[in-house]
Image: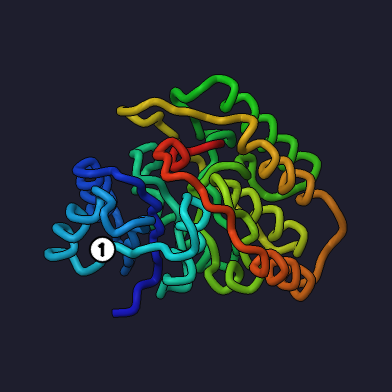
Amino acid sequence: MTPRVSVIVPVYNEGEAILRCLERMLREMLLPAEVLIVHDMPEDTTVPYVEQVARTDPRVRAVLNTYGRGPANAIRFGIDAALAPVVVVTMADGCDDPRQIDELARLVDRGVVVAAASRYMPGGQQVGGPRLKRMMSRWAGRSLYTFARVGTRDATNSFKAYDTAFVREVGIESRTGFEIGLELTAKANRLRLPVAEIPTIWLDRPLGESHFDLGRFLPGYLRWYFFAYGRRLSRAALAARAAGSRSVPPPRAPHDSTEYEKTA
């Protein structure tokens, strides 16, 4: 059966912890789905556990990213490998609510190109996480919603569903961090395509420590924050931008597990 939704999960040495993430996800999803666990290297400690699950659940498969190291390239590769008309990007750290994967996918089925899980709309909440990161993402989300009218109060959250054809048409230019969520929201806004949101409760990861590197990731977020404002663009113009970005080799990112933690 062809899946209706492809779930993209970038990982880096999650090891046995991925089992809990997959168990919750597979239990909660009702739509026909595939779950792509995207890793950067064959020896990633996540892979044996994913293969263990895949032996009993054909929805799951481990996918080796060949686009370059880091979460942005893993997400790009996962979307290109997806079989479904809708893709949902979520993390392996347990912060996102897997019960909402189907709900986000159904919004895309109804015609939006980006469906966001929003911490900052009525009914949403963020529990835990670094204070500075919370303040900055809340300010960015609310200002983009109010002044750029992007359609969501949480443009920086990575937990989103996308129309697969839309993403492949406009392309992804981001190569570091998790600014892809903001990039695709900004592009949808400049095309004047519909974006929707549902409230979500984001819970800080129970294990590990966040290492948000403001200096490293802020330039990418600012680029797409300001891009969201402006006149309407054509699909051809955005596709040409993405084609230009693909001609530049991606930077070689270090194998650092902290890069795989949410950065907004």
Q: Please, which residue is most extreme toward the top here?
A: 131
For this rendering, which residue is in front, 102 or 3?
A: 3
Residue 116 position, x and y percent, is 55, 49
Name the residue rendered at 55%, 42% in the picture. Answer: 157
| Image mark count | 1
Q: Mark 1: which amino acid? A: Val
Residue position marked by numbered label 1 in the rendering: 60
Q: Quadrant of the C terminus?
A: top right
In this rendering, does residue 113 appear at all? yes
Name the residue rendered at 34%, 56% in the picture. Answer: 41
Q: Please, which residue is most extreme toward the right here?
A: 231
Q: Quadrant of the N terminus?
A: bottom left
- Vertical arrangement, residue 236 with respect to residue 258, above or below: below
Report crowding for label 1: few under 14, some 14 to 19, many 20 or more residues within 10 A (C-alpha).
many
Give the colour scheme shown. rainbow
Residue 134 position, x and y percent, is 57, 26
Q: Is residue 237 left or right of residue 95?
A: right
Name the residue rendered at 39%, 57% in the picture. Answer: 102
Residue 163 position, x and y percent, is 55, 67
For this rendering, which residue is in front, 203 or 40?
A: 40
For this rendering, which residue is in front, 185 or 245?
A: 245
In this rendering, does residue 107 appear at all? no
Helix, strand or loop at label 1? It is strand
Residue 125 position, x and y percent, is 49, 30
Name the residue rendered at 28%, 51% in the picture. Answer: 44
